[in-house]
Amino acid sequence: MPTADVAPLASLSGRERSRLWRVRFRLGEWLSRSLVVVPSLYIVLALALAELVPKIGGSGDVLSLKIDVDTARTILSAVAGGMIAFTGLVVSIAVVVVQFGASQYTPRLVSRFRRDPIVKHSLGIFIAPAIYALVSLRLIGQNGSKVVPSVTVMVTMALLIAAVLVFFLLVSRLLDLLRPRRVIAQIVDQGVRAIDEVYPFELGRTPSLELVPGTPISRVLHHRGRPAVLSALDRARLVRAAAQANVIVEAAVGIGEYLPPGAPLFLIHGEQDSPVDLAELRRSAILEDERTIAQDPAFAMRAIVDIALRALSPAVNDPTTAVQAVDGLEALLITLAGRDLQRGRIADAEGRLRLLYPTPRWVELLDLSVTEIRHYGADTPQIARRLRSLLLTLRATTQDVRHEALDDQLKRLDTAIQAAYPDPTERAHAETPDHLGLGASREAASG
């Protein structure tokens, strides 16, 4: 009986095996994308603070500020109106930065700005002094009192100072988010986490399982509703549903693929009358408007490649940024090369195969990382030299099973360089591996 590498259900993280994984995943994605939740919390805190401070600090001039009612009202009114206008200005600046980042790198990075926690907390801290000051104005001169609640005024000033300091932090953050190295590093970090989630086994370490003879497809579950992208799969839920009905469930599309209305979503292998809970299968597919990196490390590579292609375009002509993008791709490829990429099979607790889903192979991931950059950058010495260094480094640090695809990419690179550099001297220069593109050439190990 044939065998295949099959991951047991226990190989999934405890978080993913939870029956609440789908709810947590969707809630986490919504919270990370929302620009409303965090600022709303700051508004609630400002309202609560405006109610608590007078009760704690009293309505007298306990700090001896010795300011009159009109001055206090002027201060609070200025803070309220000024911070509202200031928040609008900051939002406008952030939108301009997002537009610049999208045009300079790739539109797929817009979500990076939306998900950044410092941006969200900054918006909340900017609006909090205005809300606090507006609510606190009602205490100034209340019942004809000539005494100013000094604690209320000082808290307003403290919130204002905090907002100014956070503004400097936000400016630093926005500038940092525009640095190519920083943007690429963030994508690589997310990509590595996705690799750990999707491919937990080292190459050759995945458990083997005897496969039963191929069972026919008894039912096809089609996608209903508007077009969407398969963003993630609740794999534990799918395994449990398949085990309960004693069938094998196969995802008809891979994670990150587009699903038009009516497209096959799941293929069910088993008896025609198997009691499969189709609604449970539908709930297991996380459908979104766009790809996410959570279970799709190839999307991280796609985003980095897009940065490189934008940098190599004639309008930008920035090969150094493209070299930095190749640096990020190298980190992801080295991690992927050491993992068993035939991960799309999961068995239930009793060791029976229950779930199949397509995953990109090493050849496809390497092609995604290298082909387009080679096509648009082979005539640039930095790119030609850096790509050769990448491929030779991978060949020297990976197992033999990865070498065939690497050798094929090296041949394609040789062909592209020969076509781009008719002069033998220039060609020899472009064929020299260099980890920096230019400035660090050295003889790389060829395996």
Image: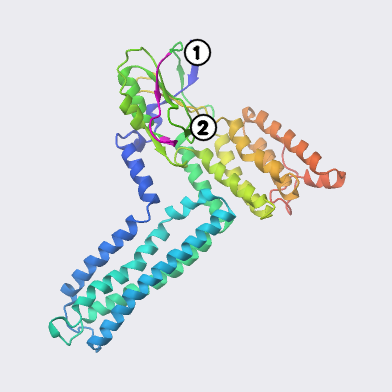
- Residue 420 or residue 410, whichever sits in front: 420
Q: Are marks 1 and 2 in contact (CB under 8 Å)?
A: no
Q: Is residue 118 above or below residue 405?
A: below
**Residue 322 as seen in the image, left or right of residue 263:** right
Q: Is residue 167 magenta?
A: no
Please name the residue that numbered disc 1 is placed on.
2
Counting from the top left corner in percent of width and height, residue 152 is at 24, 77
Quadrant location of residue 417?
top right
* CA separation in Å, label 1 and label 2: 22 Å
**Residue that appears at 73% across and 53% down:** 438
Most common secondary structure along the magenta stretch:
strand
**Residue that appears at 72% across and 42% down:** 444
Counting from the top left corner in percent of width and height, residue 416 is at 76, 39
**Residue that appears at 43% across and 31% down:** 261
Quadrant location of residue 266?
top left
Label 2 Cα neighbours within 10 Å, binned few <14 / some 14-19 / many ≥20: some
**Residue 128 as seen in the image, left or right of residue 440:** left
Q: Of the residues shown, which amino acid type is indicated by label 2?
A: Glu
Label 1 Cα neighbours within 10 Å, binned few <14 / some 14-19 / many ≥20: few
Counting from the top left corner in percent of width and height, residue 68 is at 23, 89
What SS does tag 2 mark? loop
- Considering every residue shown, the one lying at the far right of the view is 424
- Residue 418 or residue 345, whichever sits in front: 418
What SS does tag 1 mark? loop
Quadrant location of residue 317?
bottom right
Please name the residue that numbered disc 2 is placed on.
202
Q: Is residue 224 magenta?
A: yes
Q: Of the residues shown, which amino acid type is indicated by label 1?
A: Pro
Q: Quadrant of the C terminus?
A: top right
Point out the stretch of residues depicted in magenta: 217-232
